Image: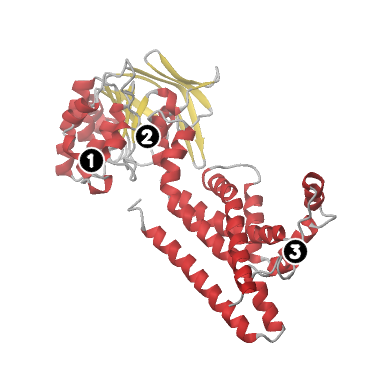
Amino acid sequence: MKFTLQKLQLRQEHFLLEVDLTASGQIIGIFGNSGAGKTSLLEVVAGLRRPASGRIAVDDLLLMDCNSRIFLHPEHRGVGYVPQDLALFPHLSVRKNLTYGHKPEAVSSAISLAHVADVLEIEALLDRAIADLSGGQKQRVAFARALLASPRLLLMDEPLASLDQELKWKIIPYLKRIRDEFKIPMLYVSHSPDEVIELCDQVIVMRGGKCLRTSPPGEIFEATTSMALKPGIYGEP
Amino acid sequence: MNADDVQVIGRTLGTAGLSTLLIFPFGVALAWLLARKEWPGKSLIETVVALPLVMPPVATGLILLNLLGRHGPVGVLVQHIFGAEIVFTWKAVVAAMAVMSFPFLVRTVRLAFEEINPRLEQVARTLGASPARVFMTITLPLAVRGMMAGAVWAFARALGEFGATVLVAGNIPGRTTTMSVAIYSDIQLDHEGHAYELMAISAVLAFAAILFSNQFSKWGGTR
């Protein structure tokens, strides 16, 4: 995936997001501490916020270009979004959550419910209520729901931030399975270096609404001391 | 309880039910706009809608009388289109009840909409749902208990409406008298026993409405 953000500018009440970058890789991490603008950036890519200026493209697909007045609405972007709080629909069963965006009749839909349920090991949960799921199960259902809409791009907003370390390391293999089985490019927001090192090919480092640099994770984390950035820019140790 | 009482109770229940039905779609639409959208004049509309909560009901009734009366803008319009008068008819009772109970409906339903995590609606959009589908499949089902509670509160408020009603609909036996107006009239005429009978019936109806509202909000599982 080639991910291009040109002269993107989003003004909020006490915050200005200004990004201009190009990154390539199957999983591109967006890394930074709280308030860096990571979630705002994902929301812009998902079409949930409308920036004042800029252009966004994923490979050859133009999602938004303010100069040409092009703005694809979220339902037309084909971008799957897993927010930090997962936002599973509480009044629907697991099965109905999963099939909400699934279009089995679509010829291009290569992802089936059975396949996703198998890969993420959620077959036994399909008829359960959301309230009856554990934290890790909810996580996997949220991934599956986003996958079943056959997205061109998956946006993951700190999907493991609310889990304890033990559960986090149980979920990471599922993310690797998504990467290897479905080959869907991902933008993966995190403030945890170990997640980024484990999953991402490239990392966009953000602070104060700006992109500091884009590099492979190895370079970023080796460079920490020599760059003499403030402690905390890379999150928890 | 005599035949007149049954008629008064029936009229009160009927006009309160009709006023609730009439304001329900507008109340839900306005509550959604207030909860989910930013638009010019929002603060002004919020204030106007809340006015009947804080203004003396008789003052609201006076405004309604000027609007709906024979020479009022709404009264003239209705006379022109339907050839009918509003004031001092059962229609005025419905209008007074609707205006007085509207804020109760809007405030309760607005809270119900605000309680829904906007992320649910956003994620539904990213899953390919149009705004209309998101509203029908996510927003509405999650707000339905709040909407029903709002309707019950509005209905209960309409049942007890007095000040505005007596001004725009008067107390015309067999035509506009509601339970509240009948109680007031009985006290004025020294028919205390009858007033207490109607008061007891009013209390039972209000109790049943609130009980229903509370029970309804417990049904339907967790949000």
When the figure is inspected, residue A166 is found, relative to residue A21, above or below; the finding is below
Tell me the residue that label 2 is attached to: A38
The scheme the figure's colours follow is secondary structure
- Residue at mark 1 to residue at mark 3: CA–CA distance: 56 Å
Q: Position of residue B112 (x, y in %)?
A: 46, 52
Which of the 4 quarters of the picture holds residue B197? bottom right
State if disc 1 and disc 2 touch (CB < 8 Å): no
2 or 3: mark nearer the eye: 3
Identify the residue at image location x=27%, y=37%: A159
Judged left or right of residue B153, residue A75 is left
Q: Residue furthest right?
A: B71
- Residue at mark 2 to residue at mark 1: CA–CA distance: 34 Å
- Mark number, residue B168: 3
Q: Residue furthest top?
A: A60
State if disc 3 and disc 1 touch (CB < 8 Å): no
Which of the 4 quarters of the picture holds residue A104? top left
Q: Are marks 2 and 1 on the same chain?
A: yes
- Front one among B195 and B209: B195
Q: Position of residue B153 (x, y in %)?
A: 52, 62
Q: Secondary structure at mark 3?
A: helix
Identify the residue at image location x=25%, y=36%: A141
Q: Position of residue A192 (x, y in %)?
A: 24, 37
Please, what is the three-letter code of the amino acid marked with disc 2?
Answer: Lys
Assess disc 1: are there few (<14), some (14-19) or many (≥20) residues with their C-alpha within 10 Å of its C-alpha.
few
Assess disc 2: are there few (<14), some (14-19) or many (≥20) residues with their C-alpha within 10 Å of its C-alpha.
many
Q: Secondary structure at mark 1?
A: loop
Question: Split into 4 quadrants, where in the image is the N terminus of chain A?
Answer: top left
Judged left or right of residue A154, residue B101 is right
- Residue at mark 2 to residue at mark 3: CA–CA distance: 58 Å
